Image: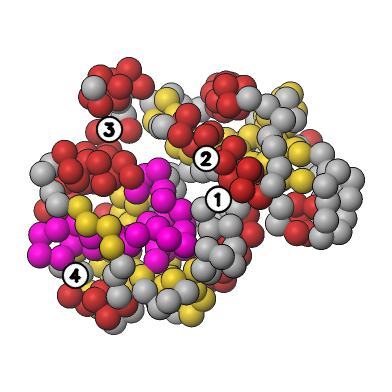
C-alpha cells in the first residue's frame, strides 16, 4: 500500500489557537524543538466520535511540558476542546489524535528561555499500529538500546527526545524480520516495547514492569483496571530478562497498539490465551462506550 506523505494531505490542523490548512501547518528549520528535542506530545484515539480518556491525555501533556521546563500557553479545557474540534473539522469519528507542544525558533542554543511555546493538534485515520494481522500475535526482537535511568533523562514525560532510541530499536527489529523490539531498562531488566507497555502472564497472574524509567501508560493503567475487574491478580514488579521464557502469555498495551498479543520475543514463543483474549475484548468494549457510560461503569 502506497504511503501518503504527512505533509501533503487534505484537512485542517489546529496550530497556535487557530485552524490552518493541513499543508500550511509549517515550522521554521531553526525551530529549537527540532534541534534540541524540546517538545512533548500525546497520542490519543477516538472511537465512535469520542476521544478515549481525553482529559487524562491532556493532563499528561501539561505535566510533560512542566517536567521539560516550559508552560503550555492554553488551558487544559482549551486543549480538550481543540482536540474535539480538530477531529470534527476533519470529518473523523475513528481517529488518532496527536497534540504536540514545542519551543520555537527565537533562540537556537542549549539555553532557550525566551522561545515561544507552540502547540499543534493533528488527527487522521490510523488503524491499529500492527495492522489487521495483529491478532495472530506480533514478534519482538531484543533491543540493544536500553531505557535510561530516571536521573539521566526526563523519563516520566512523554518527551520527543526519548523516542529516538525507540525508533532505532524498531528499525533494527524490522530489518531482522520482527514487528517491534522489547527494550530493557538501565539495569538490564524488562522495560517496554518501543511505544507500548508490556504484560506477562505467569502462573495465571498478570505481571508488568514497574515504570521507574518509562511512561506509566494510560492504556497500561486501563488494562490493569480491567484485569482486576475480572478478578485477575495484577503484579507490578521488576521482571528480569531471564524470566521472559517462562511466561505463558505476553501482550502489549498502548494507545496506538491498543491491546495486542505477542507470539515471539527473541527465541521465545508464546500462544495468546484466555487472559489476553479477555482483556482484548474488555478493552474493545470499554473504548466503544460513551464518556457517560464509562463514568457510570466506574461509579
Q: Earlier in the sequence, mark 3 or mark 2?
A: 2
Q: Which residue bears the numbered disc 3? A: 286
Q: Residues in magenta? A: 191-220
For numbered disc 3, what is the local secondary structure? helix
What is the C-alpha distance between the residues marked 1 and 3? 24 Å
Foreground residue among 154 and 161: 154
Q: Earlier in the sequence, mark 4 or mark 1?
A: 1
Q: Earlier in the sequence, mark 2 or mark 4?
A: 2
Q: Earlier in the sequence, mark 4 or mark 3?
A: 4
Foreground residue among 200 and 98: 200
Query: In the rendered image of this protein, does residue 278 appear above or below residue 166?
Result: above
* Circles 2 and 1 in contact, beta carbons < 8 Å: yes
Query: Badge 4: few (under 14), some or many (20 or more) residues near its Cα, within 10 Å?
Result: many
Q: Which residue bears the numbered disc 1? A: 158
Q: Which residue bears the numbered disc 2? A: 60
Query: In the rendered image of this protein, does residue 174 appear above or below residue 17?
Result: below
* Occupied quadrant, residue 12: top right
Q: Which mark is residue 247?
A: 4
Amino acid at each position: 500500500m502506497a504511503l501518503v506523505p504527512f505533509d501533503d494531505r487534505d484537512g485542517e490542523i489546529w496550530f497556535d489557537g487557530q485552524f490552518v490548512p493541513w499543508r500550511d501547518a509549517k515550522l521554521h528549520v531553526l525551530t529549537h524543538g527540532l534541534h534540541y528535542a524540546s517538545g512533548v506530545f500525546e497520542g490519543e484515539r477516538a472511537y465512535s466520535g469520542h476521544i478515549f480518556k481525553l482529559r487524562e491525555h491532556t493532563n499528561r501533556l501539561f505535566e510533560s511540558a512542566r517536567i521539560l521546563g516550559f508552560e503550555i500557553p492554553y488551558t487544559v479545557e482549551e486543549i480538550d476542546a481543540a482536540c474535539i474540534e480538530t477531529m470534527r473539522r476533519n470529518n473523523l469519528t475513528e481517529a488518532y489524535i496527536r497534540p504536540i507542544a514545542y519551543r520555537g525558533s527565537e533562540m537556537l542554543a542549549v539555553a532557550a528561555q525566551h522561545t515561544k511555546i507552540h502547540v499543534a493538534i493533528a488527527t487522521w485515520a490510523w488503524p491499529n499500529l500492527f495492522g489487521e494481522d495483529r491478532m495472530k500475535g506480533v514478534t519482538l526482537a531484543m533491543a540493544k538500546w536500553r531505557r535510561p535511568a530516571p536521573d539521566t533523562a526526563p523519563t516520566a514525560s512523554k518527551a520527543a527526545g526519548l523516542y529516538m532510541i525507540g525508533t532505532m530499536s524498531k528499525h533494527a527489529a524490522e530489518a531482522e524480520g520482527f514487528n517491534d523490539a522489547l527494550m530493557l531498562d538501565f539495569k538490564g531488566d524488562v522495560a517496554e516495547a518501543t511505544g507500548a507497555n508490556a504484560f506477562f502472564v505467569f502462573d495465571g497472574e498478570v505481571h508488568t514492569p514497574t515504570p521507574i524509567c518509562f511512561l506509566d501508560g494510560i492504556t497500561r493503567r486501563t488494562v490493569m483496571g480491567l484485569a482486576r475487574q475480572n478478578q485477575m491478580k495484577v503484579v507490578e514488579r521488576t521482571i528480569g530478562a531471564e524470566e521472559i521464557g517462562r511466561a505463558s502469555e505476553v501482550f502489549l498495551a498502548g494507545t496506538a497498539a491498543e491491546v495486542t498479543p505477542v507470539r515471539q520475543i527473541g527465541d521465545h514463543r508464546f500462544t495468546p490465551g484466555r487472559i489476553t483474549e479477555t482483556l482484548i475484548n474488555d478493552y474493545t468494549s470499554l473504548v466503544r462506550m460513551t464518556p457517560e457510560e464509562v463514568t457510570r461503569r466506574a461509579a
